[in-house]
């Protein structure tokens, strides 16, 4: 079983690092997101939460965990600690891997061409998927690079 821990705001990495330094087994699922500049950055799937494995821990020192840098407290329901099963954690890990390795119609840095719309016949570079139907494209317009988000139906791969 795994305990659910609440972290301090935007301190998931710090909490994981300091808990692992104390020989705890910790899991925080991450996803890749595009920031406003078009760069891919990792963000926690569950912001503000991490999982702590309570197996192989004899007499868990709760105050030691709570006082770890980045950790706010255990998530509780009344007097009971919130727990997640090993099966749930394995399922989340599998989904995390599938999400990262999911191969779509286009590959990163692939040359594409617009088939319709205002950019028809223009070529660009496919950067990443953005939602279910949209993607991020790098265009070179008037000697200036521009990142645009477009519907995937408007583009095709250039062979």
Image (cartoon, rainbow, N blue to C red):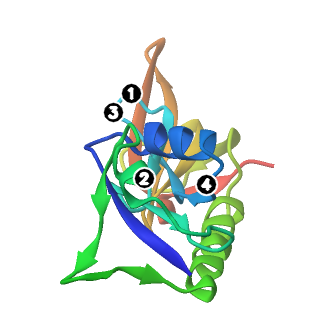
Residue placed most toward the observer, 90 or 117: 90
Instruction: Say few, some or many: other residues with alpha carbon within 10 Å of mark 2 (under 14 / 14 to 19 / 20 or more).
Output: many
What label does residue 24 carry, if any?
A: 4
Residue placed most toward the observer, 16 or 34: 16
Disc 2 target residue: 65
Residue 98 vs residue 5: left or right? right
Disc 1 target residue: 37
Q: Which quadrant of the view contains residue 35?
A: top left
Disc 3 target residue: 36
Asked if one can make out residue 104 in the rendered structure from this viewpoint, the answer is: no
Work out how far the residue at label 1 is from the one at label 4, CA to CA, in angstroms.
36 Å
Q: Earlier in the sequence, mark 2 or mark 4?
A: 4
Residue 150 spot, x, y in % from top left: 40, 52
Instruction: Say few, some or many: other residues with alpha carbon within 10 Å of mark 3 (under 14 / 14 to 19 / 20 or more).
Output: few
- Mark 2 in CB contact with mark 4 (< 8 angstroms): yes
- Mark 4 in CB contact with mark 3 (< 8 angstroms): no
Residue 95 spot, x, y in % from top left: 61, 74
């Amino acid at each position: 079983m795994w305990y659910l821990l609440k972290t301090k705001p935007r301190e998931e990495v710090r909490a994981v690092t300091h808990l692992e330094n104390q020989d705890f087994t910790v899991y925080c699922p991450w996803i890749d997101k595009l920031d406003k500049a078009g760069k891919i950055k990792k963000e926690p799937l569950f912001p503000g939460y991490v999982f702590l494995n309570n197996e192989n821990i004899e007499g868990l020192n709760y105050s030691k965990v709570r006082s770890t840098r980045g950790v706010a407290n255990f998530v509780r329901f009344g007097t009971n600690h919130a727990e997640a099963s090993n099966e749930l954690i394995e399922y989340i890990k599998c989904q995390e891997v599938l999400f990262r390795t999911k191969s779509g119609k286009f590959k990163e840095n692939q040359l594409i061409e617009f088939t319709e719309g205002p950019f028809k016949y223009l070529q660009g570079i496919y950067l990443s998927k953005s939602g279910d139907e949209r993607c991020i494209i790098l265009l070179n317009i008037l000697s200036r690079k521009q990142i645009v988000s477009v519907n995937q139906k408007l583009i095709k791969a250039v062979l």
